[in-house]
Amino acid sequence: MIGSIKGKIILKTEKYLIVETAGVGYKINVSPDVLSKVNAKDKEFFFFIHTHVREDLFDLYGFLERQELEFFEMLINVSGIGPKGALSILGIASLDTLRKAISTGDTAYLTKISGIGRKTAEKIVIELRDKIDEKKSGASLQGELDAMEALRSLGYSQNEIREALKKVDPESGINAKIKEALKILGNK
C-alpha cells in the first residue's frame, strides 16, 4: 500500500490533485481544506496517503497532517461512512472542533454536513466518542452553530462560512467569532 507521496502538483481540481513523483502522476482525493493550503503549482508537497482498494476501485486520499489521516481512518471505520463522506466531514471544520462535537455528543453540529443525517451522526458519536482523546472542556458547540446561522443570514454561503470559521479561535465567544469571520470574509 502507498503510505505517502512527495512530489509536485501538476493539476489541481475542485476534488483532487495530480501529484507527479518519479515521472508518475498520482490522482489524490483531498478535502477542501487541503486544496486551500496547496496553492502553489509546481511546488513540492508531502502527503500522508490512505489507499482505498475495492474490487473495482483503487483510490488515494491525501492529507498534509498525520492527525488528519488518523481521524479520516477512524471515520471510515464507522459503518455507513465511506471515504468521500469522511472527506466531507473533514471539510466542515477543524479537527479540534470535530473532536469536540463528537466527544460532547453534539449530533446537531454533525448533521450540518450534507449527506449526514441524525442516525449517522449518532452512529459517529457512539462509535468514536471513546476513541477520541478530548482533553478540552465539554462545552457545547451551540456558539459555533449560532455564528454559522448569523453569517448565513448575512448572505454568505455554507462553504465560505466553514472556511472562515476554521480560521477563527474556537474558544472565543459568539460575537468575537462573528466579527473575526466577517473580517476574514471581507478580505476575500
Image (spheres, rainbow, N blue to C red):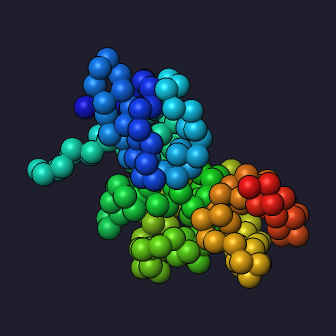
Residue 6 position in % (x across, y down) = 42, 24
The residue at the point 43 percent across, 48 percent down is 13
Which of 78/181 is in front?
A: 181
Q: Is residue 69 above or below residue 175?
A: above
Residue 146 visible (yes or no): no
Quarter of the rendering containing residue 179: bottom right
Q: Is residue 164 left or right of residue 42?
A: right
The residue at the point 47 percent across, 80 percent down is 118
In the rendered image, the quadrant that contains the C terminus is bottom right
Q: Is residue 109 left or right of residue 72?
A: right
Q: Is residue 120 left or right of residue 57?
A: right
Q: Is residue 141 above or below residue 63?
A: below
The residue at the point 45 percent across, 53 percent down is 14
Q: Is residue 176 above or below residue 68?
A: below
Residue 5 position in % (x across, y down) = 39, 27
In the rendered image, the quadrant that contains the N terminus is top left
Which of 48/140 is in front?
A: 48
Quarter of the rendering containing residue 76: bottom left
The residue at the point 29 percent across, 20 percent down is 23
**Residue farthest top in this picture:** 22
Q: Is residue 158 above or below residue 19?
A: below
Quarter of the rendering containing residue 20: top left
Residue 53 visible (yes or no): yes
Residue 175 position in % (x across, y down) = 88, 69
Residue 134 position in % (x across, y down) = 63, 52
